[in-house]
Image (tube, rainbow, N blue to C red):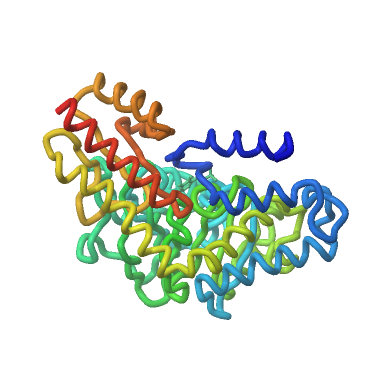
Amino acid sequence: MSATATAQSNVTSERVFNFSAGPAVLPVSVLEQLRDEMMCYPGAGASIMELSHRGKVFVEIMEQAQSSLRSLLNVPDTHEVLFLQGGSALQFSMIPCNLLRGSNKTAEYLVTGSWGKKAIAEGRKEGDVTATFDGSTTNYDRVPKAGDYQTSSDAAYLYYCSNETIQGVQFQSEPEAPAGVPLICDASSDFLSRPLDISKYGLIYACAQKNAGPAGVTAVIMRKDLIDKGDAGLPGYLNYQNHYEADSMWNTPPTFAIYVLGKITRWLLDDIGGLEAMKALNEEKSSMVYDVIDANPNFYKGHAQVDCRSKMNVTFNLPSDELLSKFIKEAGEHKLASLAGHRSVGGIRASLYNAMPREGAQALAQFMSDFAAKNG
Ligand SMILES: *Cc1c(COP(=O)(O)O)cnc(C)c1O
């Protein structure tokens, strides 16, 4: 082995099981491709980061990323795929800027956690909004059932977050919007974790850095008839129409992030075998961890109600702050990293995104089981 190859394998062996909520774990095979293509993208004579977004090489990368996203999710022709910047936080504003401002309607939000709360606060700046469901009364431990809320058939849109990353509560299927009311979804932290029926959505979006790539790009899939609703007076970047007309190149797109997102979609199609297979693996991984919580009910306290549990972010607490610190410290010694819960909720949060291998979930479950036996 050359000195460089040895250095590389040493670095790889230092990798931990990374339970970070985002930016988060990426598939090793994708990271290896990025490494191999870093100095020179095959045939391009330069790194992908050094190429014009208008050149043939990048335009092909962009088209490949869009078409593999379309095929993974079976996106119908009625919907457009856009790649934007500004993260999911900018969508909190762009959605009401385009679909609420000046409409004389009310936008309805199902608020099931921290991200929904942030989204409705931004919506309020653009027009009338109402929290059709507000989970704060039970500390965001559940999502509503169909009978728990009533949506007006005249709403500007019905907005929800499919997976609340911080609380670890997830919709198991999409809420029903009345005919004519666009359903809007923040799918940032469970995008591409399972198949979806895109035809049900007016707009669904996800920043890439949880489950679909690095920070820097946000995928927006929207129904074409909603694209031109923005007022001409909006700042240009905020108007979906500009991005649509310019094929997501209204300004310089985040070329590197789109390139990596394209690799992730190929990995899902070729290595995983599509979203049904991904869903099965995600269910298997999250069950391993929830099973340990359920087997030790006096030691581990899950945050989410059982039928609302997230397959992506498993949130739970321990009997005391001392045990919590001890858990995090000892987990680190077992190469189980980034398990501390969000500062607003505390406890433990284990994010088990697509790229977390089965072995990572297994190692965490084993550690949890042993830790409860020793300290319970
Ligand atoms: C991370 C996250 C966001 C915020 O994404 P940014 O790209 O930081 O703006 C919004 N919604 C959900 C569900 C998230 O997980």
Q: For the N terminus, which image quadrant? A: top right
For the residue pair 147 and 274, the one nearer the viewer reads as: 274
- Looking at the image, residue 376 sits to the left or right of residue 17; the answer is left
Identified at 58% across, 58% down, the residue is 264
**On screen, 324 above or below 42?**
above
Q: In which quarter of the image is residue 132?
A: bottom left
- Looking at the image, residue 282 sits to the left or right of residue 50; the answer is left
Image mark count:
0
For the residue pair 120 and 317, the one nearer the viewer reads as: 317
- Looking at the image, residue 21 sits to the left or right of residue 242; the answer is left
Q: Quadrant of residue 311?
A: bottom left
**On screen, 311 above or below 270?**
above
Identified at 54% across, 68% down, the residue is 269
Residue furthest out toward the right: 45
Residue furthest out toward the left: 298
Identified at 23% across, 31% down, the residue is 371
**Residue 147: x %, y % from top left:** 20, 65
